[in-house]
Amino acid sequence: MITGPGAAMLDAKLFVARLDGSFRDLYERWWDGDEWVWVHHGRPNGLAVTGVPGAAMMNQKLFIVVDDGSLWERHWHGTGWAWVDHGKPGGRRITMGPGAAMMDEKLFVVTDDGALWERHWYGTGWNWVSHGTPPGTRVATAPGAAMMDSKLFVGCADGRMFERHWHGSGWGWVDHGAPPGTRVATAPGAAMMDSKLFVGCADGRMFERHWHGSGWGWVDHGAPPGTAVATAPGAAMMNSKLFVGCADGRMFERHWHGTGWGWVDHGAPPGTGVASAPGAAMMDSKVFVSTADGRLFERHWHGSGWGWVDHGAAIHDQGQHVIGAPGTDPKLTIVVMGEGYAESELAAYRAHVDMLVVGSLRLDLLAAHQAAFRVVRVDLVSVEPGASERRYNADGSMASEMLRNSRLGIIPNDSWNRCWFDQSALSASRIDKVRRRFAPDADHVLVLVNSGTFGGCSSLGPGTALFTRGSGTMVVAHELGHNLFQLADEYAGDNAFTGVSRFANTSEALTDWTTLKWFDLVDAGTPLPTDEAAPPAGWNRGRSVGAFEGAGASFATGVFRPVLECRMNQNKPPWCPVCGRKIALDLEAFE
């Protein structure tokens, strides 16, 4: 479960607190220029957070209340974030706020005795200022709807709304009473033009409190069609619209269309319902809410209409060493990241990494070289479960497509001719961004794609290897042969090879076969080249070494492979002696 969104900054970030289990921490949702990412800010002094982050100032600080009722500031000091302890006002627990930030130097909270307090920066330090309680009642909502750096509004226990107003030489309380026929039930919000604000009421209606030039009046906006207002009004935009969450989980907009107000039904986020006040308005085109299933959703205007964007449940990406340990000593360093694994599937992802990747790195002769590896697993969280899928017709036209909100934009296509995967224009940059963050020394990137289809595709040498969870350990091992050790495919195609082979396990046709790369592994008397249809008597298809024509995946003639069966030929057999020697020599440099 996460709180409502708060403390928007720079039209690129907002903050929420997660309130369930062991995750009761502060989180930032940040647009890094390419995608939205979760940033984990943890908790101050080991104290779990308890409320909505608020009172953003100078695009570098915000405030949060923690488990013991004290106020903490999260402050960007130029090179990193730090926690600042503001303590408790008058020794009392804070129960609501922080809110109503003013002049980048003050904010307001409410304590457990219903009193309003101000936290004020006076130039050289912070002070607590007691505002007490409104006459004859107690504050019952968070402070909100700050105006003109001199007034704010609160809802009270008896259903009235009060204003706390600076009149030039001191603060005073102004009684706004209760809306006609009902009571104030939510925090005041959505201040506009320094002359109006909005509240939700006990009977499900929304009221506006409006300054008409000579005094204040109540304006009844009624209830959204077929439902009731259930949250504080928020996310004011363009002095003409605001948003509320409703009792049936929908979000409604109240919009001034030039001659009057109207309700706009935004519906409910897919598969869930709105559970918080809308907030963190950005660029007059997006607003955020938390939902009943503990997620953050964005409502976004895309130019011709509104759409919902699922931001997930504030689970952040994490890295963990699964082979080796952190260090600076030279190792063959590999980073593994998941594509299309949602939060609910992280345990399955970790199991898939153990089975497919760690299992592959312990096959055959690799089992004796574990000290050469450093493997970092990144638990990369996608919003939706499962990877996108795409299929093609025989003529190359697209047959079907099913797109999901995944992190890396990798799309299994179930086609060998297309190397099993399509990639979005952003895939390479996002993969590299994750690599640089979690394993900057890694030259080898393995992407495990959450698809039950078959497929593996890799660079030949340092770079990126892609494979599906449905491909199996042997396919992964084959791709590791390409990616980690620059081994070529040993199966054949239909084309003729010309030129010089640069790979340790393939060779061009030679005029002098004694110069064959692996000649020292060839038994005396073995004909070179070697006839696959008639190998010498007693030939071991996986261990006996010769020179068989056809290799490199694409070539039937002109290029030769050392054995009849090898992992670089058929996936399942062990690596052949030629591949094994190359692997052992490469790993010796790291042992």
Image (cartoon, grey):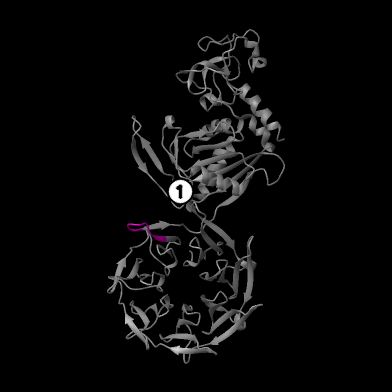
Task: Classify 292 as above or below 324.
Answer: below
Question: What residue appears at the point 55 percent right and 52 percent down from the top-left corner?
Answer: 317
Tell me if residue 290 can be seen: no
| 149 versus 408 height, above or below | below
Looking at the rendering, which quadrant does residue 235 occupy? bottom left
Q: Answer above or below: position of 189 versus 337.
A: below
Residue under the image location 30 percent in, 75 percent down? 223
User: Foreground: 112 or 542?
Assistant: 112
Q: Give the range drawn in magenta.
A: 298-306
Give the quadrant of residue 505. top right
Quadrant in which the C terminus appears = top right
Q: In the image, is 103 to the left or to the right of 307?
A: right
The vertical placement of 548 against 333, above or below, is: above
Query: Which kind of residue does numbered mark 1 sit on?
Result: Ser
Mark 1 highlights which residue? Answer: 406
Of residues 330 and 543, the one nearer the viewer is 330
